[in-house]
Image (tube, coloured by chain):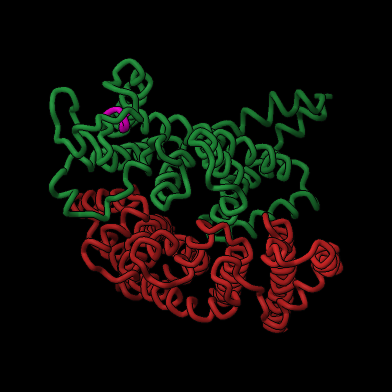
Amino acid sequence: MKPLQKVAASILCAIFVLMVLATFLLPAHYAHQFRDIPNAGPSAAHPLGTDALGRDSLSRLLYGSRVSLLLAPAAALLSTLIAALLGSAAGLLGGWFERIVLAATDLSLALPWLFLLLVVRALLPLDVPPLVSIAIAFLMMGLLGWQASVRVICAAARGVRDSDFLLLARSSGCKPARLLLRHVAPNLRPLFYAQFFISIPLFILTEANLSILGLGVMEPMPSWGNLMRGFEDFSMLSANPWRLVPLVLLVIVVMCFQLVLPSQEVTQ
Amino acid sequence: MIEESKSTSLFRLALRRLLFLVCLGLSGALVSATLVRFAPGFGVQERELDPRWSATSVEALRREQALNQGLVSFYFHYLSALSHGDLGESDSLKRPVRELLRQRLPVTGSSVLRGLGLAWLAASSLALLGLAYRGWLFEASTTAFNSLLLSLPSAVVAMLAVHLRAPVFLAIAAVVFPRLYTYIRNLLLRVYDQPHVLAARARGLGSHVILCRHVLPLAAPPLLALLGVSFAISFGAAIPIEALCDSPGLGQLAWHAALGRDLPLIVNVTLVVSLIMLAANFFADLAGLTFAGSAP
């Protein structure tokens, strides 16, 4: 691991630990309104001030980071699982199954992803409780975000299928289950990790885009995208530059993920 | 003789791709028909809520609707209407989808094309410049700038464009550029490290000759494939950018449709966009195949 990657990984770890500890650090509940001090500047009681409704910005940031940072990996896990199952089955079985899976992948790769997400979002009701909106947003990304990984995993699984060690294992009477668990899975595991880590920043960014457009996580639940709504108002931003903290945090996290990734790709 | 067999195999491959494209388009149309058919509120008419209509009239109205609503006949009607270019009517705007598309597509098309052109120009010239100089300062600064752009959600880029009063195509270019640059740079690095390029350099060939005769023919097929992918990226980026920059294009239309839960509109917009994408990918593939066939 290069020193830069170590730094990025430790920043990510620090942010994650902070988010998990946030429950004990929160100055106030994320939806609690201090109605007499709306739009307040930073103070000892409210280190990042309050928003237009008088809610404590730091609490909202910490809670929103937790929403974004815990659910993006969850969605990435879901999509990687789907991709792993479909991709390795297609690569190992080959034949018409592989052709169908690859055709479906081609079709959905040709579609701009955001259009697909909007279609699915339009199918579901918009006036849902915040928790349900979180579940919808991240399930949607997890269930629809596997296409790019399937191609890579399928190609690798095809390589494993044609390999000599698998032929040897099969000829020495290895059962299919043992073949899969002891010979195929360990060879594909680094690839699964890589795809998982590639998906996380992608999902964080997509959640931000959807929430800014009002189609992701619903108020009063905060998320990074939600906290960035209203950034069009630049006079407000230049008067209160600390409102930019969610954006800065998002950029740092996504950049750290990008820096950590190369080592993962080398292990393929 | 060899030439002829090469061209016939190319033709056969193109035909197969075209057939695949038609199948994909048809299945896309069927999926969208299903979505429209099962959309909430499908077939419900405002007249049913009108208290002046008697119960028997409402019943008759429903029966009349039901005649058209068998799934197979619905697919047939949908596909035959589609073949005439009739894409149905938008629920929220009460206007034919076709008319909306005719108004909105040129707006998005022009900003996407200009944005893509700018992004490709910037990405390829910067990648070539980086290869020519290979200084650590240049590399570090472009990598940092690039990863900063990659880490910004496209909606934030759109807000920045609103603030700077930048045109929509510039915002699209800013979203597409970092993705292109990384890929082009890695691709060129890989090709420049090939032994035949080293041999050409050892023979004292000029950098232009090396680029045009030895690097580009190898790099062209993946670059053409990237062209197809970049279309999809830019259309995807058009949604938040047009929505926030208030540009009356397809992206904004899709956003309004999603907010208004107007399924006939968003499904048909997505269908048209995916057909454009498939056609773009088809031509990019075909060009890549021709190139790969003609390369030495």
The answer to whether B284 appears left or right of B193 in the picture is right
- Answer yes or no: is residue B78 visible: yes
Q: Which chain is green?
A: A
Which x, y percent locates residue A194? 50, 37
Q: Residue at x 70, y 67 (%)?
A: B47
The quarter holding residue B3 reads bottom right
The number of discs equals 0
Q: Which residues are drawn in magenta? A: A58-62
Q: Residue at x 18, y 50 (%)?
A: A236
Q: Residue at x 32, y 75 (%)?
A: B208
Image position of B101 (left or right of A17): right
Identity of the residue furthest to the top in this view: A24
B116 or A160: nearer the eye? B116
Magenta segment includes B45: no
Image coords of residue B67 (percent x, y): 86, 68
Q: Nearer the viewer, residue B272 or B16?
A: B272
* Along the line of sight, the residue nearer the viewer: B115 or A6: B115
Question: Quick check: can you spot residue B285?
Answer: no
Chain colored red? B
* Residue B247: % across, % down: 37, 70
Q: Is residue A218 positioned above or below B224 on the image? A: above
x and y percentages locating residue B183 in the rendered image:
41, 57
Q: Is residue B237 above or below residue A47?
A: below
Q: Main secondary structure of the magenta part?
A: helix
Q: Which residue sits at x=33%, y=65%?
A: B245
Query: The N terminus of chain A lies in which quarter of the figure?
Result: top left
Left or right of A87? Residue A9 is left
Q: Residue A257, located in which quarter of the rendered image?
A: top left
